[in-house]
Amino acid sequence: YDAGAIQLIKLLKVKGLRVPGDLAVAGFGDDPAADLIEPGLTTWHQSPYEIGRQAFQFFLDQLVQETTPDLLHIVPGQLVVRESTGGR
């Protein structure tokens, strides 16, 4: 969750710790703010469209089927490396 990771970076700065020098921080969600904070936040990106599409398909499958559905759905993603982990 990027918002929590961004708040952590701010708190670490207040405490005098260096990111990534003393601690590396990464998030999840690729929020637009992840590229605006200093240092930029390394994060995991997944398509919100694809997450929604798969969730809706799961819902539709529930309406049609009376069996237990497959609960494992993999949404492809990618690591967006920025400065908070020593990247770029």
Image: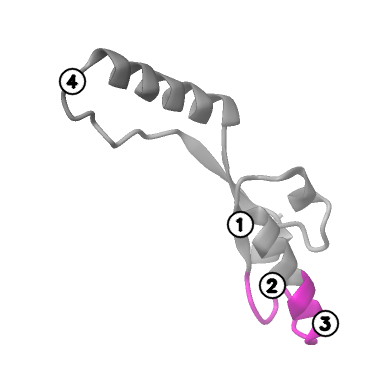
Number of numbered labels in the structure image: 4
Image position of 54 (left or right of 87): left
Residue at 26%, 12% (x, y): give it: 64
**Does dot 1 land on a helix, a strand or a loop?**
strand
> Which mark is nearer the camera, 2 or 1?
1
Span colored in magenta: 10-24
Mark 1–mark 4 distance (CA, rounded to whole Å)? 37 Å
Q: Is residue 37 visible?
A: yes
Q: Nearer the viewer, residue 9 or 24?
A: 9
State which quarter of the image contains the N terminus: bottom right
Residue that mark 1 sits on: 27
Dot 2, how many residues are within 10 Å of its Cα: few (below 14), some (14-19), or many (20+)? Answer: some
Q: Give, as a three-letter code, the residue at label 4.
A: Glu
Mark 2–mark 1 distance (CA, rounded to whole Å)? 13 Å
Dot 3, how many residues are within 10 Å of its Cα: few (below 14), some (14-19), or many (20+)? Answer: few
Asked if the residue under mark 4 is in contact with the one under mark 1, i.e. CB atoms within 8 Å, the reply is no
Q: Residue furthest left?
A: 67
Residue that mark 3 sits on: 14
- Going from N to C along the chain, the mark reached first, 2 or 1, is 2
Residue at 30%, 21% (x, y): give it: 62
Colouring method of the image: one colour
Q: Give, as a three-letter code, the residue at label 3.
A: Val
Residue that mark 4 sits on: 66
State which quarter of the image contains the C terminus: bottom right
